[in-house]
Image (cartoon, grey):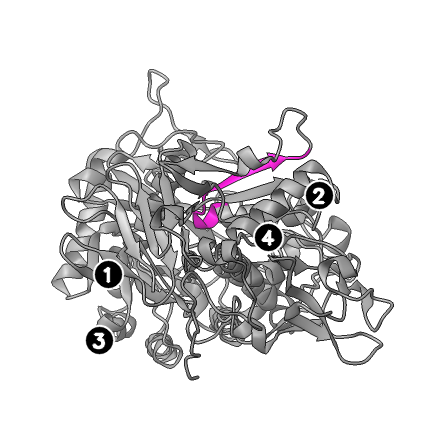
Amino acid sequence: MAHRAHRWNVLGRTRGPAVVLTAAGLLALGLGAPGASAAETPRVDLRVLVVDNGDSSVGAITAQLRSTGVPYTTVDLGDPGRPAVTEAFLSDTVNGRPRAKFQGVVLPNEAPFGAGSAEQTALEAYERTYGIPQVDAHTWAHPGVGLDYTSEGGWAGTLDGREATVTEAGRAGPFDYLEGAFTFEDNSPLTRESYGYVAQPRAGFTSYVDLPVPAGQGRGSLVGEYAHDGRRELVVTFAYNQHQQHFRLLARGIVEWLTQGVHLGQSRNHFAVHVDDVFAPDSRWDTERNCTPGDFDCAGGDGEGTAPIRMTADDARYAAQWQRERGFTLDMVYNAGSGEEWKAEHGGTDALTARLLADRSQYRWINHTYTHPYLGCVQDTSTVPWSCAKNADGSVKWTSRAEIAAQIRDNHDWAVARGLPVDRTELVTGEHSGLKSLPQQPVDNPHLAGALADNGVRWIASDNSREPGQRAVGAALTVPRHPMNVYYNVGTEAEMTDEYNWIYTSRADGGSGVCETDPTSTCLPAPLDTATGYDTHIAPQEARTALGHVVSGDPRPHYVHQSNLAEDRILYPVLDKVLADYAALFAANTPLENLPQRAIGTELQRRAAWQAALDANRVTAHRIGTTVTVTAPAGVRIPVTAPEGTRKQLLLGTAVFGTPYAGERSAWTTPEALQSSVTLKLP
């Protein structure tokens, strides 16, 4: 697809019809009013004001600001001790220069303080004077926001499952990163998930997102810009929360419109998939006993009774071909020693290993330890669930530092000897073992950090479902991974559906009943058909979950197992749907970023440091005309998003700033040599 051209004004994109600006508005945009001196050009701080009444819509936009690193100040309308929104609260003077303290304003609706009230009047005067945009997070259709009532050719009702479209004005403006059409979530026929007002625009209103008027004619707006009285409002007429996909798709554009395309923070969409246990076999689910032989809790489970699952050379050949066709790279998380054991037990040859080694350069490779042992406490399996074995003095018996270090070292050395492009700083331990695992092991193996240091490991994978936050393990940092609901112990769709039924159906329907006692789970209304359930229910649901992580800007990788690339190759339908749905939703200027583990770890590390600096109020950023200046604590990288054409000030001269993404440029940046701040020159 051709890359769309972008029209930028000095601080943002030209969107829709031209807006007539007052002298004050021109001055606020850095253009300068006739006869104005340089000292009169206002300073606009790069911070957003959020007026919060507790509605989910305001919460959703606030979550987007925080997750992308945009500074904001919240005024809680429910707090009797909150500051009053006055002229002094909104603006002042710094070194003789007028200062707007906020570059944009998020309101729960168009007039949360009450029309004509002192606070509402002060806010509107501020927006008019400094050209500050206002987002109405959720309101109804009426002339006060530039729309006809729904009784005049519009409609109000449930939007679940309806297809909306980004208009030409939307794609030429704040939503230019979207391909055009998207569907409102409809996850349950029993629940109304989104209610909205579809209405006809009046003069001064430019629709950015619309849909056909149900039971009517033409199309009506759901999101649009209302320019009036020297002010600009982004009007949203449907309800949403931060987790719904239709909001996640529009969130970037809402922030870009609000900040006129210049703000601290950045947002990119990431998707990485780790395939664990490569070279090793995985145990198989027993559909008769409803457990996995070899597991401690499998009655009579001695490891016999079912054949293990292991990829073949044909499976490996298919994986390489799939990658080439999709333009997507898998991370092969390998156990070389387990592969050597398999080869020794099967005549000394292994076509799978030969094929994977032949295609070594087509994958990324991550150390998964040599033979995948449990690296935490020594497990006492005499009881179910297992417990940590104890020494004679009652202390916990731990896997030693030497054992852990050898597992890491031997696996790495095997890879290097065979030319695998492996990074010694990355590690995934078997079952994320060695890290704390509740309830049996509430602390890390005390020998783990030393063994990581012995091998130069800086990034160790953790399970996001247990530990979503990044943390230190000695000198290393964790990289939380999302477990995909595609099980390690199944090779066929029928096996996957059988185990899924066991977990997610009630005892009355033949399931385990876990879903009846686990507050985080929901029982299926009836068991899925093992012949069709995977394709019709499980795969689409898992793809939706993964895509939700992607469109929320979450860089954390997902993980599956080599068994999912074998036999029925059940992983591919999930990945294909994620990639296809993404391509259908996003324009070519917003590609998926497929990062290695170390880069994901670095991204999480930078985000945490940036948020800590914001929380400590140690960041200052402002814009004067076409110059942006940002200061932050030494060593903290600064995320900035700005229009195409932005340049970074060097000690001598300037350089192109950042890299392109979603129609803009962004980067983690720091001051140049002999500079104390980052200075950007806008186009």
Relative horizontal placement of residue 71, taking residue 477 as reference (left or right): right
Q: Nearer the viewer, residue 377 or 188?
A: 188
Q: Secondary structure at mark 2?
A: loop
Gap between marks 2 and 4, in whole Å? 12 Å
User: Residue at coordinates 56% horizontally, 67% vertically from top-left?
Assistant: 19
User: Residue at coordinates 30% horizontally, 35% vertically from top-left?
Assistant: 473
- Decide whether residue 613 is among the magenta residues: no
Q: Earlier in the sequence, mark 1 or mark 2?
A: 2
Question: Which is in the foreground here, disc 4 or disc 3?
Answer: 4
Q: Quadrant of the N terminus?
A: bottom left
The kind of residue tagged 4 is Gln
Residue that badge 4 annotates: 134
Q: Quadrant of residue 6?
A: bottom left
Q: How busy is the neighbourhood of tag 4: few (under 14 within 10 Å), some, or many (20 plus)?
A: many
Relative horizontal placement of residue 41, taking residue 217 as reference (left or right): left
Question: Which is in the foreground here, disc 3 or disc 2?
Answer: 2
Residue that badge 1 annotates: 340
The kind of residue tagged 3 is Ala
- Position of 499 relative to 65 (above/below): below
Residue that badge 3 annotates: 358
Magenta stretch, residue numbers: 66-77
The kind of residue tagged 2 is Pro
Q: Quadrant of the C terminus?
A: bottom left
Q: Earlier in the sequence, mark 3 or mark 2?
A: 2
Q: Residue furthest right?
A: 151
Question: Which is in the foreground here, disc 1 or disc 2?
Answer: 2
